Amino acid sequence: MSKIVLTSEQAEALGKSDYPIALCRPDGSPLAFITKSGRVYSANPPVFSAEEVAAAEKEADTCTTWYTTEEVLERLNRLGAP
């Protein structure tokens, strides 16, 4: 496991920050985000090819069954999902 030691100023800034916290490269571009629970998420979104996007759009156009967020959450609750 790698270890990065923060400077006192960096640690203090993290302690005073609102969540989520963006960790940025020297040029200011986001590298990752830290949530209040301590989870770290990469700032690099997945990259999809034009073919993958086209296939997903075609599939969405042919889909006849749609579910609301409420229906999905109810189903997950019935399955015992957290």
Image (cartoon, helix red, strand yellow):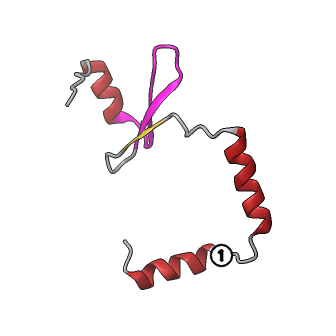
For this view, does 21 lie left or right of residue 3? Answer: right
As for residue 22 lying within the magenta part, the answer is yes
Reply above or below: 43 against 24: below
The residue at which mark 1 appears reads as 68
As for residue 71 lying within the magenta part, the answer is no
Give the crowd class for mark 1: few <14, some 14-19, many >=20 residues within 10 Å: few
For this view, does 40 lie left or right of residue 3? Answer: right
Reply above or below: 8 against 39: above
Q: Could you tell me the amino acid type at mark 1?
A: Thr
Which residue is depicted at the point 37% across and 71% down? 82
Reply above or below: 69 against 14: below
- Is disc 1 placed on a helix, strand or loop? loop
Which residue is depicted at the point 59% across and 37% down? 47
The outermost residue toward the bottom is 78
Dividing the picture into quadrants, the one containing residue 81 is bottom left
Which residue is depicted at the point 43% across and 43% down? 19
Which residue is depicted at the point 73% across and 61% down? 59
Q: Which residues are magenta?
A: 16-34
Reply above or below: 77 against 3: below
